[in-house]
Amino acid sequence: MTTIRMIPAHEIVRRTYPRPPPQEQDEIAMATGKAIDGALAQFGYELRQGRRPTQTTITTVAASILDEALEEAAVTITAPVREATMREVQEVVRAYRQSAIAGLTRPKTRVFVVDGKVGVYAQPDYWDGRGRFFEMKSYRAIPPPPDVALQVRLFQLAFPKFEAVLVCLDRHSRPVASTSAVVPAPTSEEASATLRLAYDVGSEFGQEKVLEYVEGPFVHYALPPPPG
């Protein structure tokens, strides 16, 4: 059996670009993000079943997720703030409905392996099942900031034959704006730096697994030489 250190892509991003401890406003923003993700997941599922989900149904799902997330964070919000938050969720759902990702599914997790010793789980938000994957942000991320750029590069290494598309449903704009941009494939230098980073972070923080028990598909890379 072959042992390997496994780490998810989002953990590499978090370790590379750590954030300060969340304040109350951050907790509210994260709860809102969870509500949006849940609403879009439910909406997409209904579309794939050939149904036309009502705004009431989706709002109910989002409200339940929002309340649960706020309770877990031990944060309370006033009724006006909650109403404004739910309107924000509804506007994002409307923008999603008109976007290229409406009704698409999430791909199965893929793994890229570096030097046979570190593996990275990678799962973008959506794909078309043919040649494109999509990462969605509910804020303006075009051009992508460093953490988003790293996240997409990690996905590109796991899906090397796919075109990467960043989709932004900016919940902070009025009306909610839907924008998208194709993210160019990483240069050889960018790919090498990302593989080296994944190897270093995975070696330190990854969990030891038996490779034969890890589900693929897999992409294998050799560890690039150290810079300089």
Image (cartoon, rainbow, N blue to C red):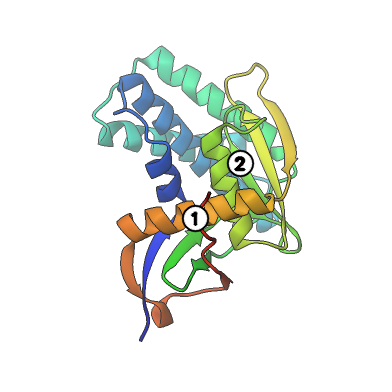
> Closest to the observer: 191 or 166?
191
- Judge whether 48 appears above or below 37 on screen: below
Q: Name the residue under label 1.
A: 226
> Closest to the observer: 84 or 24?
24
User: Which numbered tag is attached to residue 136?
Assistant: 2
Number of residues whose C-alpha sits closer than 10 Å to that of mark 2, classed few (under 14), some (14–19) or many (20 or more): some
User: How many numbered marks, from 0 up?
Assistant: 2
Q: What's the residue at 58%, 55% (across, down)?
A: 192
- Amino acid type, residue under disc 2 in the picture: Met
User: Which numbered tag is attached to residue 64?
Assistant: none
Left or right of 220 in this view: 71: left
Number of residues whose C-alpha sits closer than 10 Å to that of mark 1, classed few (under 14), some (14–19) or many (20 or more): few
Task: Quadrant for the N terminus, please.
Answer: bottom left
Element at label 2: strand
Inter-mark Cα distance, 1 to 2: 33 Å
Residue 139 at x, y = what percent?
58, 28
- Judge whether 147 appears above or below 131 on screen: above
> Closest to the observer: 57 or 32?
32
Residue 168 at x, y = what percent?
65, 33
- Judge whether 94 appears above or below 199 on screen: above
Residue 65 at x, y = what percent?
40, 39
Q: What's the residue at 63%, 18% (across, down)?
A: 173
